[in-house]
Image (cartoon, grey):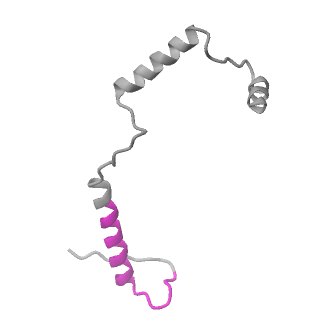
Amino acid sequence: MSTTLSIPVDLPAGYQTDELVSKLTAYAKKLVAKAVHHTPKNDPTLLTKEEFFAKVDASLAEYERGESRVFTDSASMNAWLNAL
């Protein structure tokens, strides 16, 4: 199947419309193939659902023990950060 494409822009010198469309199509196919076949690498920062909720529970327990800081406004937070 052949498709005619009209590009209403000035092409760089030496480019033909069919050549440009062919290159753009090939590039788009490569991008789609990468997206479809993408397998995430082993990322040590990713957490499982259980690990995430364990961290949330640990943070809540820390808060209940009074081992966290609470700021009522940005000025007090900035003052504490500047004192570090």
Q: Position of residue 26 (x, y in %)?
A: 31, 72
Q: Vertically, is 32 above or below 12?
A: above
Which residue is most to the left?
A: 1
Residue 8 located left or right of residue 38: right
Residue 12 located left or right of residue 31: right
Which residue is most to the front?
A: 84
Q: In the rendered structure, which segment of residues is drawn in magenta?
A: 10-32
Q: Vertically, is 42 above or below 63?
A: below
Q: Position of residue 64 (x, y in %)?
A: 56, 8
Which residue is most to the top?
A: 65
Quadrant of the rendered structure where residue 70 is? Answer: top right
Give me the residue at 28% from left, 60% from top: 33
Image quarter in which the C terminus is found: top right
Quadrant of the rendered structure where residue 16 is? Answer: bottom left
- 3 part of magenta stretch: no
Image quarter in which the N terminus is found: bottom left
Quadrant of the rendered structure where residue 17 is? Answer: bottom left
Give me the residue at 37% from left, 73% from top: 24
Q: Position of residue 29 (x, y in %)?
A: 30, 66
Residue 78 located left or right of residue 17: right
Q: Vertically, is 14 above or below 32?
A: below
- Magenta stretch: dominant SS? helix
Give me the residue at 31% from left, 66% from top: 30
- 26 part of magenta stretch: yes
55 or 10, which is in the foreground?
Answer: 55
